[in-house]
Image (tube, rainbow, N blue to C red):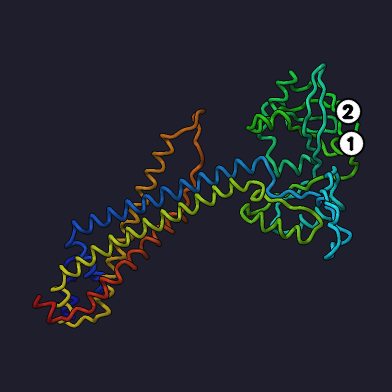
Amino acid sequence: MAAEGAPAAVLPFARWLPFEWIVAIRFLREGRVQTAFIIGGVAIGVAVIVFMSALITGLQSSLIERVLTGIPHIQLTPQRDIVRALRHNTPGTREGAVMQAPLQKLKGIDQWQSVMAQVGAMPEVAVASPGVSGSAVVVRGDVSRVIALTGMIPDLYFRVVALPDKIVKGSARLDGTDILIGTELAADLGIGVGDKLNVTGNGGAVTTLTVTGIFDLGNKFVNERSTFMALRTAQTLTALPGGVTSIDVTVQDVYAAEVIAQRIMNSANVEADSWITTNKQFFTAISAQTISMNAIRFFVGLSVAFGIASVLVVSVVQKSREIGILRAMGISRGQVLRIFLLQGGLLGLGGALAGSVLGYAGLTTWMRLTRAVDGSSLFTLELTLGLFGWTLLLATITGLVAAVVPALRAARLDPVVAINA
């Protein structure tokens, strides 16, 4: 018990601390310079992890949000027509005729109502919206343009694609005689909200539609061709009464879109393309960012671990006499082991707390200094308690792991040799 009394006077609150904590804190206080340097090094490493994690995560979320606001997560379309050989070549016979892929004609999804009900019942699916896509010609006076028309049910489609947020003039109202056009098409035709357009579909049907809204999807070529109208109007123009050419699907987890698309293809007679498949290069870039972020975390954590380990190795050498005296006074090897493990954990935790504050300050400063052309934020940072909690836990565990070798070395010291060293 005498060994517990000596260090107890060092700290006013020592009576409430276990013996190992008292000795660990005393060793850290005696080596103030070393402790300050290693906590500073850990703090810088943790600040880098917090800064880069929040920055890359925010950037990825912003990019994905911008991409997915204009497209569905999964699009279901009719299966393609293919040519199948009626007979196979046999050895010794002449080579058969060369088969050519057939022209893909505009057609609807077979029994699309049942397919839509089946997909909509999946728990991973948020909303499913039927649509008709095709081409048409719009005429305004002596000027004509070829357009890509999309017919849909507004109440459903606007939950898949936030088209009302893209309207710059007019509104997103769509009745049977309304049409929404892009800014470039409106400029080419010299028309505005309330003007009439003569639209001729690829099926030969002609109708007159009123422009109720002008949108900007952020892409000049898309704004030149894209138009939106009511589902029944598009069905008439494409000579597809009662049919749909696609079903647009939004899912709860955007990263699970490809898995869900494969499940739909296996259960329904449709093609299913997820945004991951149709944007392979973009998704590859996002994956590369995630890999880079994990690599940064790993190497920063490795440098922090080596820093803590090196300081504790020096501490073992410096404190070998004290360790020998404590061992001679009756403390066990396990207690010595816990003393140095606690030092490693406290160094990691202290550096992580300081680094979290430093990383948060750096992020808020960076966001104030970097602005888009219009003065708005480049993207939204996702500063969650989970990020800081995970960082604190990781740094503390890193400190404990880094302290294992020095702690084992200290626990194995022979008391007689240590005292006479």
Q: Residue at x 51, y 51 (%)?
A: 288
Total marks drawn?
2
Residue 250: x %, y % from top left: 69, 49
Residue at position x 45%, y 56% in the image: 294
Label 2 CA crowd tier, 10 Å (few <14, some 14–19, many 20+): some
Q: Nearer the viewer, residue 414 or 120?
A: 414
Q: Image quadrant for the N terminus?
A: bottom left
Figure check: 154 above or below 296: above
Q: Which residue is mark 2?
A: 207
Question: Marks 2 and 1, Cα distance to the nearest angstrom?
Answer: 9 Å
Q: Amino acid at mark 2?
A: Thr
In the rendered structure, find residue 236 and report the number of the disc placed on it: 1
**Amino acid tagged 1:** Thr
**Which residue sits at x=48%, y=54%?**
291
Disc ID at residue 382: none
Is 12 in front, or is 344? 344
| Quarter of the image with the C terminus in it | bottom left
Q: Is residue 113 visible?
A: no
In the figure, residue 107 lies in which quadrant?
Answer: top right
